[in-house]
Amino acid sequence: MPEARFCRVSSQRFLPAFRLIAVALCATAFLLPAAEAAKKPPAGKKGQQVSADSKRSSAKSASKHSVKDDDKADRVVSGGRNVVASIRKRGGKTVVAVQRRSVVRVVEARQSFGQLAGLHSTEDALDLKSSVALVIDQDTREVLFSKNDHAVLPIASLTKLMTGLIISEARLPSDELITISQDDVDTEKGSRSRLTVGTTLPRGELLHLALMSSENRAAHALGRTYPGGLATFVSVMNAKAKMLGMKDTRYVEPTGLSSRNQSSAQDLALLVNAAYADATVRQLSTSPEYQVEVGSRVLQYNTTNRLVKNPDWDIGVQKTGYISEAGQCLVMQTKIAGRKLIMVFLDSAGKFGRIGDAERVRRWVEATHNMVNPAAQQQAVATHVAG
């Protein structure tokens, strides 16, 4: 039996093969990621392959831009608050594109004193938007409707009704010229006025603008130029309120811009009654419009109460008011269904809430004024549907 032979195989024989495998693995490690990237679509164009034509076009465009010295990359320049300008050059021309960024401002609504006190949760038969309301017969003092009428709240420009009454009763010269000064500029609420500092108008015209159009600088100038000055005028306002029996009323300035000017519906009904007795206040507060000459300009002013121009209403005296602490306010003397009524609406929600409340009360009075039986009248209030 032939003897088995064992051949020793040298490792040098397999060295070339090992080298070939190593080279193949390295090539795969470098080339595979590039191949995968080539399969992916360009950013922003999913599922679309970049054609050879588009590649050539991009290359040509890049070459074109690199050749021309006047074609520069886009620049973004701030043009002020919320304004951005993009500047680029095209064909030797400068192209500027201005874009205004939209800004959304979230302003938290301030609650009125009535809202903070929970007065708006009080329900009433007429579903009024005002948290405070009072309707009384001017001749008999009969209370026809009331809602939180003893609540003491800021009264805004209803203040000017007392301001006008004091000025009218003082019998000061209506043609005396008064100049608007820096002291008359509102620094509390920052309200605007077309009566610029240096404007000079007769006292009578300032009184007209204060009562009809609720002009703040006009009202302040009237108080400032009162004999004895502003402090004396405010003390006279409070003394007049006390004389009228307005126990819950306090004034600190003549415009109503301060929330410290406060009163109740009961007190304001007394003020409306007194203001109605003054012919000047009646006439000026119910004026629908008025023009004043300021230098070479003619300023057109209008009433702040649109009911004054409404033929369905017969209004003897009126005043509106608004600051955020007071809400929308309205007081007036009017005649409805043959009855002279005094209406007070305080802390009304919404721009037109006080007007809507007045309309609701008017329709209710017209529907119920002939009812003599109090029980029947109360039932009518409960079942009446306010429009």
Image (cartoon, grey):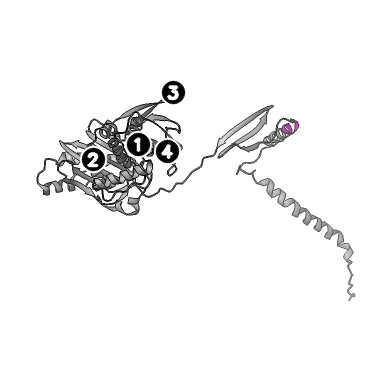
The magenta stretch is 63-68
Relative to 184, 237 lies left or right: left
Of the two numbered discs 2 and 3 on the same chain, state the one appearing first in sequence.
Answer: 2
Relative to 196, 83 lies left or right: right
Of the two numbered discs 2 and 4 on the same chain, state the one appearing first in sequence.
Answer: 4
Determine the CA span between mark 1 and mark 2. Answer: 19 Å
Q: Position of residue 287 (x, y in %)?
A: 29, 30
Q: Could one spot residue 273 in this view of the protein?
A: yes
Q: Position of residue 265 (x, y in %)?
A: 26, 47
Mark toward the viewer: 1 or 2: 2
Q: Which mark is residue 214?
A: 1
Q: Which mark is residue 274?
A: 2
Mark toward the viewer: 4 or 3: 4
Give yes or no for contact between labels 1 and 4 (Cβ–Cβ under 8 Å).
no
The residue that mark 4 highlights is 184
Q: Position of residue 376 (x, y in %)?
A: 11, 47
Q: Is residue 349 magenta?
A: no
Identify the residue shown where x is 18% and y is 45%. 144
- Compared to residue 63, the image places residue 240 above or below, namely below
Name the dominant secondary structure of the magenta segment: helix
Determine the CA span between mark 1 and mark 4. Answer: 14 Å
Q: Which residue type carries mark 2?
A: Ala
Identify the residue shown where x is 38% and y is 42%. 230
Q: Which residue type carries mark 1?
A: Ser
The residue that mark 3 highlights is 296
